[in-house]
Amino acid sequence: MSFSTISIVLLTSLVNFKMAYAKTCDKILQPQDYLVCSGSDITYYGSDFQGPACAVGNVEVTQFALDSRYSKNCQSWTIGGNYKQGTGSADGNISVGGNVNLGSVRVSGELQYGGNLSLAVSNVLGGLKPVNKEIPKGAAANAWKFFEDQSKTMADKKATSKPQTFNKILTLSNQGINQVFEIKAKDLQSTKVIKIDGTCATPLIINIIGESAIISETDIQISKSLESCMGNIFFNFPHAKSIVIKKSGAGKIGIPGTILAPQANLDFSDDLVTGGVFARNITGSGQVNYSKPAWPADQSSPIQSTSYESSKGIAK
C-alpha cells in the first residue's frame, strides 16, 4: 500500500469518526426549548449550562461548557452577534450571526457563522458552514421576545394569595391553580428563608416588584413534591434593572426555579439555578442546571431558524 493510499484511508477514517460523533438536528428550536437567553449579552467564565442558550447580542465565555444532553436537544448556542470562547465545549450545533473566535473548544455539532471565523485548536465535529447573518439574528430576537412576553403576562396577573411571614421566614403554598404571589424586591434582602410548598400540576408565579434586587442571604427551600419540576417556579422581576445573586460569605445560593428579568443586568456569581435564566444581560460564573420550565403552550411559536438534516447534520 502506498503512502498516499494510507493517507487517504486515514483521512477517510477521521472524517467518518467525526461524523459518527457529530451531534445532528432534525427539528427547529422553539423558544421554550432554551434554558438560558439574554436580550443583549452573556459574559461568563468557569461554569456550565445544562441546556441550549441564546443571546440577541454577543457571547463571551471561557472555561465553560454548554451541555444539551440533559434537555435531549441538538442545538447549543443561537447568537445574534459575536461569539468568543477561550476554552471548554459546546454539545450540539451552534448558529452565530456575527464573528466567531474560538480557542481550545470542542464542538460536537455544526458551527454556522455569519461573519469572520477564527479557530485556534478547536475541534468542530459537525463541520463549518457560512450562513446569512440574519438567520441567527432573527432566531435569537424571536426567542427573546417570547420571554419578554412571558414576563409581562405573568406581571399582569393579580396576586391570588398572600405569602405568610414570620420571623424573617416567608412561606408560599401552591395548592391552587395558577397560584400568583407578589413580593417587594427590597424585602428579599432581609428575608432569611423562603419556603415553597405545592405540586407539579400547575406553575407557581412569584412577581417580585422593584427596580433592583439583591439575593445574598436568603435560603430558598422547596417541598419534596416540587423537586422534579423546579423550573415551574417562576421568579419574575418585570421592572428590575439590576439583580445580584451572590452569597455573602462562604457557601452558595441555590435558586430552585426560573428567573425572568427582561430589563435587568443579572450578576450571577458562583451560585446555582435549577430552572431557566432569562435576563437582558447575564454575567458571572453561576451554574444553570436543567429543569425545563412549563411555558403556556398557547404562547409558544416556532423560531424561523435553520433546520438540519438528521442524517448529515447539514443546514438546509
Image: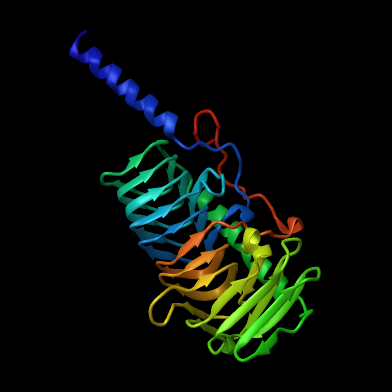
Report the residue that reaches farthest toward the top: 1
Of the pair 107 and 191, the residue shown nearer to us: 191
Report the residue that reaches farthest toward the left: 3
Viewed as shown, does residue 235 lie left or right of 11? right
Of the pair 257 and 298, the residue shown nearer to us: 257
* Residue 34 drawn at (x, y percent): 57, 55
Q: Which quarter of the figure is the C terminus placed in?
A: top right
Viewed as shown, does residue 10 lie left or right of 282? left
* Residue 248 drawn at (x, y percent): 41, 82
* Residue 189 drawn at (x, y percent): 53, 87
Task: Reply above or below: 44 against 191.
Answer: above
The residue drawn where x is 30% and y is 48% is 118
Q: How is the image coloured?
A: rainbow
Task: Reply above or below: 74 against 148.
Answer: above
Report the residue that reaches farthest toward the front: 224
Viewed as shown, does residue 166 lie left or right of 248? right
Report the residue that reaches farthest toward the bottom: 167
Toward which corner of the image does residue 262 lie, by quadrant? Answer: bottom right
Viewed as shown, does residue 6 lie left or right of 48? left
The residue drawn where x is 78% and y is 71% is 175
Q: How many marks?
A: 0
Of the pair 172 and 122, the residue shown nearer to us: 172
The residue drawn where x is 62% and y is 55% is 31
* Residue 4 drawn at (x, y percent): 21, 14
Q: Which quarter of the figure is the N terminus placed in?
A: top left
The residue drawn where x is 44% and y is 77% is 246
Toward which corner of the image does residue 157 lie, by quadrant? Answer: bottom right
